[in-house]
């Protein structure tokens, strides 16, 4: 069996470190409320699960070993986050309109499918908790399930806490300011991804 206890602790500590998921979910929940945040968490969890499945099948290792594929994933993730920032700015200058909750599910899903940090986690961290010679599909799936469960629990806690700010940030001019601040934070997240996944820096 893999070292489940050690892996669970490592996953917990890594998820407590500020990153794209934590930032996105915290700001989204403060701006749009807990319901939107919870929907996004489902998308994030599915994205992490898909990445874990890809790792179990060897696809994540292939991306990690191919500079071209990793660069495509890296820049695709940055481009999508910048698109979300543009959408937030556009919404700040428009009349408020009902937004389907499915939109936040898709955002959470796509953000993680294009998340180079998630791919690096599965390639560089997870293998360290497999027993020597243990590289079967079941072991990979087990570790991925533990990680997704822990990450989802932390994300739910972040959404629950951040959602308390939503009544304040959505009143009057607060909604416009929140949208613009949200856009700036997303731009910062995009820059952070580029810096943390640069060649020789990951």
Image (cartoon, rainbow, N blue to C red):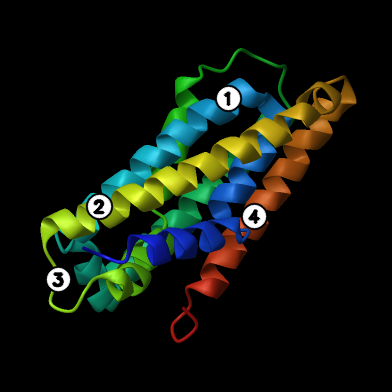
For this orientation, the residue located farthest to the top is 98
Q: Which structural element holds mark 1?
A: helix
Find residue 187 and name its label: 4
Q: CA distance from mark 3 to mark 2?
A: 12 Å
User: Of marks 1 and 4, which one's residue comes earlier in the chain?
Assistant: 1
Q: Position of residue 178 (x, y in %)?
A: 78, 35
- Circle nearer the viewer, 4 or 3: 3
N-terminal of the two: label 4 or label 3?
3
Residue that numbered label 1 is attached to: 36
Percent position of residue 18, x then y: 63, 58
- For disc 3, the marked residue is 134
Residue at point 46%, 39% (across, down): 108
Most foreground residue, 161 or 188: 161
Q: Nearer the viewer, mark 1 or mark 2?
A: 2
Q: Secondary structure at mark 2?
A: helix
Residues 78 and 95: in front is 78
Q: Earlier in the sequence, mark 3 or mark 2?
A: 3
Q: Nearer the viewer, mark 3 or mark 1?
A: 3
Most extreme residue toward the bottom is 200
Tell me the residue at 88%/26% (across/down): 173
């Amino acid at each position: 069996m893999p070292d489940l206890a050690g892996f669970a602790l490592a996953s917990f500590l890594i998820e407590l470190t500020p990153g794209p998921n934590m930032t996105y979910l915290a700001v989204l929940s403060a701006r749009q409320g807990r319901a939107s945040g919870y929907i996004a968490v489902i998308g994030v969890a599915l994205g992490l699960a898909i990445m874990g499945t890809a790792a179990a099948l060897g696809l994540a290792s292939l991306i990690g070993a191919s500079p071209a594929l990793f660069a495509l994933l890296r820049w695709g993730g940055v481009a999508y986050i910048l698109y979300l920032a543009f959408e937030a700015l556009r919404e700040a200058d428009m009349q408020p309109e009902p937004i389907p909750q499915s939109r936040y599910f898709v955002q959470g899903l796509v953000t993680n499918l294009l998340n180079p940090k998630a791919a690096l986690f599965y390639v560089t961290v997870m293998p360290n908790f497999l027993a020597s010679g243990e590289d079967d599909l079941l072991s990979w799936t087990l570790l991925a399930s533990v990680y997704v469960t822990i990450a989802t629990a932390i994300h739910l806690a972040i959404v629950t806490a951040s959602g308390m700010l939503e009544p304040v940030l959505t009143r009057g001019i607060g909604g416009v300011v929140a949208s613009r601040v949200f856009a700036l934070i997303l731009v910062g997240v995009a820059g952070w991804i580029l810096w943390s996944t640069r060649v020789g820096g990951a």
